[in-house]
């Protein structure tokens, strides 16, 4: 996912195009860090994607600085950009990955990812994909439905393994983003309805190939408000309290991705703005022992690259 520098950006008089801090103009010419883009276009031909490593590192740091000493695993939501060089850079920085297919698993492994930091999301996981992820030893499967849960148990049992599982619940909150990229409302197809989740967890604990480790949600993309996340967090914590009363304890809570970036005049949602509130909420409710997992995609890469054409 690469926000394009549009004609209006080129006509800007500003030295730095809006939202692209590592791209700047010098004597009317656009540079990525210290490199003139026209030189790259001449040397390498077009169309050409150019990524700024510094921009990736800056975005990564904005999460790490917000996290501080808290226990948080950031898993790059790689559907935002699956370029191997970009994946390698995140693996080098210590990132985990959020994958949705066997193909994406192969790419992150090729990029040097630590499988123990990989979460496997997505609807419609096939048996071979489950098997490959179990062989690789991923951290967790984010399971979307009861049929998937049962099938994963069967695949794991056949392999003599136990799959670590988070259930993806649908908290029914309005992410206040474009309806086509909203995923956390009841009418969206994703996840298990939150009121059905306790029964789903109870079923999960009876399945031989499943070990319940967490709870997961992802409410949408290009979100620029904190409140939808806090609404979702509140619902997830209520669910976790219910689970505790049923004797089911979790190790982690995954809030998904979705932080918005600047395209035109949007105010991006800074990780610190969100995470300070999330940590405060976890502490107030007595859940700060839970590991937090995040799955940001767009906000780690969206403003790190340009597409050159001629
Ligand atoms: C798309 C997606 C993400 C990443 O979303 P961004 O808006 O790119 O941060 C994370 N988790 C899941 C399950 C997704 O579908």
Image (cartoon, helix red, strand yellow):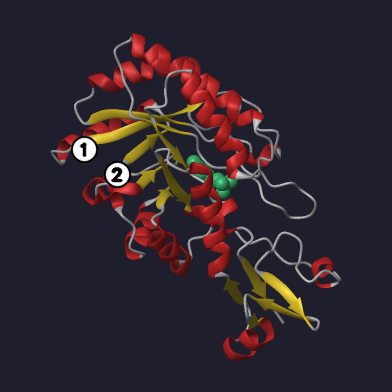
In primary-sequence order, the first of circles 1 and 2 is 2
Q: Position of residue 111 (x, y in %)?
A: 36, 64
Is residue 161 placed above or below 207 in the rendered structure? below
Image position of 95 with respect to 134: above or below: below
Res. 183 mark: none
Element under label 2? helix
Which residue was labeled with disc 1? 156
Q: Quarter of the image containing the N terminus?
A: bottom right
Residue that extends furthest to the bottom in the rendered view of this protein: 43
Q: Name the residue rendered at 53%, 36% in the picture.
A: 218
Left or right for 30, reference 191: right
Q: In which quarter of the image is the C terminus?
A: bottom right
Closer to us: 215 or 275: 275
Q: Name the residue under label 2.
A: 130
Q: Are marks 1 and 2 in contact (CB under 8 Å)?
A: yes
Q: Position of residue 29 (x, y in %)?
A: 76, 82
In this view of the protein, which residue sits in the foreground, 58 or 265? 58
Nearer to us in this view, 211 or 65: 65
Query: Going 57% across and 70% down the picture, which residue do you hit?
Result: 52
């Amino acid at each position: 996912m690469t926000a394009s520098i549009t004609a209006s950006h080129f006509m800007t008089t500003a030295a730095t195009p809006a939202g692209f801090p590592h791209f700047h103009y010098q004597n009317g010419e656009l540079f990525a860090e210290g490199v003139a883009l026209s030189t790259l276009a001449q040397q390498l031909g077009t169309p050409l994607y150019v990524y700024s490593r510094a921009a990736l590192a800056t975005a990564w740091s904005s999460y790490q600085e917000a996290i501080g000493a808290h226990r948080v695993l950031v898993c790059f939501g790689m559907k935002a950009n699956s370029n191997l060089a970009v994946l390698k850079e995140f693996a080098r920085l210590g990132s985990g990955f959020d994958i949705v297919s066997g193909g994406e698993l192969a790419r992150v492994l090729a990029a040097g990812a630590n499988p123990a930091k990989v979460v496997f999301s997505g609807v419609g996981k096939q048996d071979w994909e489950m098997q490959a992820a179990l062989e690789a030893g991923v951290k967790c499967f984010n399971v979307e439905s009861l049929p998937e849960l049962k099938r994963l148990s069967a695949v794991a049992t056949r392999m003599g393994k136990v799959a670590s599982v988070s259930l993806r619940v649908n908290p029914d909150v309005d992410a206040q983003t474009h309806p086509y990229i909203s995923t956390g409302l009841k009418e969206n197809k994703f996840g298990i309805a939150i009121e059905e989740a306790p029964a789903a967890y109870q079923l999960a604990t009876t399945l031989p190939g499943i070990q319940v480790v967490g709870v997961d949600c992802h409410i949408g993309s290009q979100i620029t408000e904190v409140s939808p996340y806090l609404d979702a967090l509140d619902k997830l914590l209520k669910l976790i309290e219910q689970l505790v009363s049923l004797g089911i304890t979790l190790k982690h809570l995954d809030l998904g991705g979705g932080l918005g970036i600047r395209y035109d005049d949007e105010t991006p949602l800074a990780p610190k703005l969100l995470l300070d509130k999330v940590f405060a909420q976890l502490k107030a409710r007595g859940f700060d022992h839970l590991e937090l997992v995040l799955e940001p995609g767009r906000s780690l890469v969206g403003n790190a690259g340009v597409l050159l054409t001629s």
